[in-house]
Image (cartoon, rainbow, N blue to C red):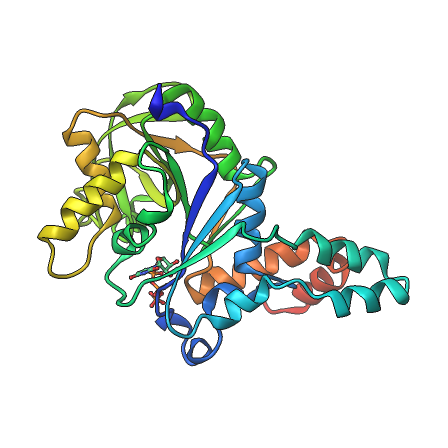
Amino acid sequence: MSNKRNVTKAIFPVAGLGTRFLPATKSIPKEIMTLVDRPLIQYAIDEARAAGIKEFIFVTSRGKGALEDYFDHSPVLEQELARKGKTALLEDLENTNMDSGAIAYVRQYKALGLGHAVWCARRLLDPTEPFAVLLPDDVIAAEKPCLQQMVEAYSETGGSMVAALEVPQEKASSYGVLDINGNVNDTTVSVKGMVEKPESGTEPSNLAVIGRYILSPNVMQNLHALKKGAGGEIQLTDAIADEIAADRGVFGYKFKGKRFDCGSKAGFLQATIAFGLSRPDLRDELSAYLKTLPA
Ligand code: UTP
């Protein structure tokens, strides 16, 4: 079945303005801000690679040059580390190297929304091929990387799939929330609707959509149709909802793992502490410091 083809391409929409991190984002793209010593984008790339992604499409914008530079290989640095016998550091660095041509960059000239950003990548996708979308703001700590979990689930369902996070009712109004048909199995639900930022008390479920998607190529066509009709922002959720209207499967996947909203300052700080505590070289010193803080 065409909608169950392997997922080998991923889109990383990184063209947003990152206003919540101003003034830093005047000159630093949000995606290369670091959790401990790795930029946010590195976590997303590692997750995509673990899921079998081979081609990486970045939708960028003005001022994102440092993000592109980050992926350049650094032979001088590598030689220097080798000369000094810093093999662990060298290995770390080499593991971030990407194959030549594996990353493509397209520009989004106006920040017209997530759906519009995804649509900007249309010419780099095969029109019969499913694709993944990862938002690097959402960092997910998981034993098995989240997108890999989804690719495995998707091989059973086909269609389109969004990552679903259980949220407390009072938080649901800041997310897109799934309206559910029923359970496919323990981890996958069939979706009959999506409500963007529902008013408190009207949430159709406690399952919120977060930044991991596996999308049918139809979604790109839906974005194209929305683009023709739209004056302003184009929402990805609308293009996915069109799949439901067309009676094609949309699924929510309840991933195992802890998600951090690194697009917000509080989430970024929480992730910094959690990832710091998970590092053997930092754990003791950091937790000793945290214990000195007033409760
Ligand atoms: P956000 O809603 O977090 O917006 O976008 P933002 O600009 O990154 O950050 P704030 O809210 O101003 O602080 C979610 C994701 O969608 C991308 C962003 O880069 C981010 O990865 N995006 C959003 C685009 O690529 N283009 C857009 O037009 C909007």
In terms of image quadrants, where is residue 14? bottom left
The image position of residue 192, as x and y in percent, is 20, 29
Q: Is residue 257 above or below residue 253?
A: below
Q: Is residue 290 above or below residue 205?
A: below
Left or right, 94 with reference to 258: right
The image position of residue 213, as x and y in percent, is 38, 40
> In the rendered view of the protein, which quadrant contains the C terminus?
bottom right
Q: Is residue 249 above or below residue 198?
A: above
**In the depicted view, which residue is nearer to us: 154 or 74?**
74
Which residue is at 76% across, 64% downward?
285
The image position of residue 147, as x and y in percent, is 49, 38
Which residue is at 21% across, 32% downward?
243
Which residue is at 26% across, 47% downward?
236
The image position of residue 207, as x and y in percent, is 32, 38
In terms of image quadrants, where is residue 209? top left
Specify the quarter for ligand 1.
Answer: bottom left
Look at the image and tell me whether residue 114 can be seen: yes
